[in-house]
Amino acid sequence: MTCKGVTARYSRITVVSGVDLSLHAGELLAVLGANGAGKSSMLGAIAGIVNGGGEIRVRGRSVGRLSTPARAATGIAFVPEQRGNIFATMSVRENIDVGLRLLPPGERELQREFILELFPILKQRDQAMAGVLSGGEQQMLAIGLALGRNPDVLILDEPSQGLAPAVFDILEHAFDILKRKGLALLLAEQNVPFAARVADRYIIMSYGSVVQTGGREDLENPEELADAFMGAGNG
Ligand SMILES: Nc1ncnc2c1ncn2[C@@H]1O[C@H](COP(=O)(O)OP(=O)(O)OP(=O)(O)O)[C@@H](O)[C@H]1O
């Protein structure tokens, strides 16, 4: 996926402008930044759930002018903040079925197996209501639901938020598998140590723009990086 000049706006107020990024298959790009820096708005604009502009290409196809569902059909999946895509009063199985419904029927069982292998706990909790799952289980379900359509690009907004460190290991392992499968992952994070564990590259946003970019080697000192973006100011 390549994005050029991405903007995001609420009503007439532009909160993100001029963001360029590229994301290759099998790679995870972390979007870092303080509260209000514009991470969620930028991800939302790419996914098509926040108004915005710019050129967005997935596998060479221009998708920036497509509706949200049409954009999803081109292979972009979005996991919003606070696992906002799951249905609390439906079971784990029903939630996964929602994600799978747009795959051709013949492909659904294979994709279900892939999701349940990625997060085996979801198999054990098959009949549990999503709303009663732990935060970590809900995050796994949110990702599982988003994977239903077998996307090429998975966009996640602060997946580590509020989770126990044990869940970080599970997410790290899952991201590794997804990268090996060839997915491109775009991840907004405020938890720099977690981002450092999973990211191949990063960008730092401040006041709606990218102010720093870097690679894995810079992520080896997450404390310094966190100081850098806290120093860059809130948006
Ligand atoms: N629904 C909205 N309506 C109006 N302004 C909004 C809305 N959502 C976000 N904003 C504004 O857009 C700017 C960017 O916010 P955004 O949530 O994208 O930042 P963020 O980096 O994701 O922060 P956080 O980590 O706190 O989620 C902020 O100034 C925020 O107040």
Image: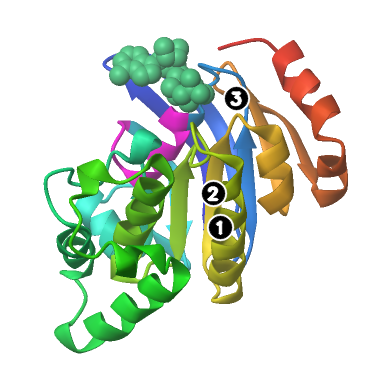
The answer to which image quadrant residue 200 occupies is bottom right
Q: Nearer the viewer, residue 6 or 226?
A: 226
Is residue 113 found inside the magenta-colored segment of the image?
A: no
Amino acid carrying mark 2 in the image: Val
**Mark 3 vs 2: CB contact within 8 A:** no
Report x, y in % for residue 157.
Answer: 45, 39
The answer to which image quadrant residue 75 occupies is bottom left
> Is residue 109 placed above or below 169 in the rendered structure?
below
Report x, y in % for residue 53.
Answer: 38, 36
Q: Which residues are magenta?
A: 40-51
Q: Which residue is mark 3?
A: 209
Q: Is residue 8 left or right of residue 216?
A: left
Residue 82 in view (yes/no): yes
> Is residue 95 placed above or below 18 in the rendered structure?
below
Q: Quadrant of ligand 1?
A: top left
The secondary element bearing badge 3 is classed as strand
Q: Which residue is mark 2?
A: 167
Q: Label 2: few (<14), some or many (≥20) within 10 Å? A: some
Report x, y in % for residue 98.
Answer: 16, 61
Of marks 3 and 1, the one in the foreground: 1
**Mark 2 vs 1: CB contact within 8 A:** yes
The secondary element bearing badge 2 is classed as helix
Q: Residue at x 29, y 55 (%)?
A: 71
Question: How many labels, in total?
Answer: 3
Q: Residue at x 81, y 50 (%)?
A: 216
Q: Which residue is mark 1?
A: 170
Q: Residue at x 52, y 67 (%)?
A: 183
Amino acid carrying mark 1 in the image: Ile
Give the mark nearest the N terminus, 3 or 1: 1
For the residues marked 3 and 1, what is the alpha-carbon distance in whole angstroms?
31 Å
